[in-house]
Image (cartoon, rainbow, N blue to C red):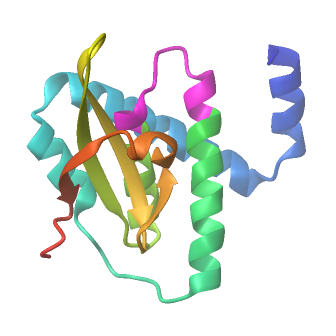
Amino acid sequence: MSLASDTRRLREITWGDRLLLAEAAAILAVASVAIQLLPFRRIVSAVTRQGPRTSDETRSSREIARAQWAVEACARRLPWKIVCFQKGLAMQMLLRRRGIATALHYGVAQDQERGLSAHVWVTYKGEAIIGGDRAAEFTCLATFPSRAS
């Protein structure tokens, strides 16, 4: 995508969507820095604490779709590499702020050529909402918040 087409698209979207994009970009930036500086457990525990929950399924579905759009759009355009970990953290935080309870999954896979690799995905009521396209390739080691909570 060119800068001109991105600028044109930005002019065509609502202020609410612009604010959501700014929020997603800020969270992706914070997540990127946190991953470099903090231990995994500390990052995950900070973003997976559940707040008050919404029971409005229509609102939840709409908010999830908007958050997916914002995280993916920002991840493609930010000037540094965004991987599944940052995307998962951003989805978790965006939705938690909106009262939508999700689960962040951390998995690993062993590959002959690449060795050990990791992947993060987020689910809502058991359905993957980000990172799910590759989740089946990985063995889930941990879910946050834990399934017991």
Tell me what residue is drawn at x 27 percent, y 71 percent: 50
Identity of the residue furthest to the front in this view: 112
In reply to whether residue 41 is colored magenta, the answer given is no
Q: Quadrant of the C terminus?
A: bottom left
Name the residue nearer the viewer: 102 or 136: 136
Q: Measured along the vertical axis of the image, is residue 15 above or below residue 125?
A: above
Residue 51 % position (x, y): 30, 74
Residue 83 % position (x, y): 42, 28
In reply to whether residue 76 is colored magenta, the answer given is yes
On screen, residue 134 versus residue 104, left or right, reads right
Residue 22 seen from this side: no
Tell me what residue is drawn at x 16 percent, y 24 percent: 37
Q: Which residues are magenta?
A: 74-86
On screen, residue 110 versus residue 59, left or right, reads left
Residue 126 % position (x, y): 41, 70
Residue 11 % position (x, y): 87, 38
Identity of the residue furthest to the bottom in this view: 55
On screen, residue 73 versus residue 91, left or right, reads right
Tell me what residue is drawn at x 56 percent, y 88 percent: 56
Name the residue nearer the viewer: 80 or 128: 128
